[in-house]
Image (spheres, grey):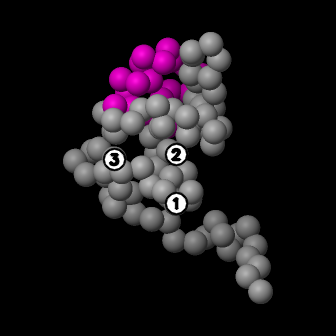
Amino acid sequence: MLERSLVDLVSLPQPDLKTFFRHGRLASIPSQLKKRQIILGKLVEEFEPDRHYPEIEVNRMLVEFHEDVASLRREMISFKLMSRSRGIYRRI
């Protein structure tokens, strides 16, 4: 049976971020959930906690990493890395 404790899962080797980035840009948005979470966690570090960002500023920051800013924004919201209210984003 495939039972693992939370400690076992957390201690699994993490993918090397260099695999996903080329010249500072995200080569592609990973399709695997865990890899996508790791990438989004890295991208959200670009945003200051407790600062409010209008959508256009979020787009300007994210386009530096990948052209599909809408997907990146949506994923950061769905993974609860950022919140959005009335077009204003905030890092959680």
Disc 1 marks a residue whose amino acid type is Gln
Does the magenta-highlighted stretch encompass residue 82? no
Nearer to us: label 3 or label 1 = 1
Query: Mark 3 or mark 1, which has the lower sequence index?
Result: 3
- Judging by the rendered image, the residue that carries numbered circle 2 is 41
In this view of the protein, which residue sits in the foreground, 46 or 77?
Answer: 77
Residue density around tag 3, few if under 14, some if 14–19, many if 20 or more, within 10 Å: many
SS at mark 3 in the image: strand
Residue 82 versus residue 5 in the image, above or below: above
Q: Amino acid at mark 3?
A: Leu
Q: Amino acid at mark 2?
A: Gly
Q: Residue at x 42, y 49 (%)?
A: 29
Residue 9's spot in the image, x, y percent? 66, 69
Q: Position of residue 44 (x, y in %)?
A: 49, 37
Residue 89 image-quadrant placement? top right
**Residue stretch rendered in magenta on the structure:** 44-63
**Residue 56, image quadrant:** top left
Which one is earlier in the sequence, the residue at label 3 or at label 2? 3
Gap between marks 3 and 2, in whole Å? 13 Å
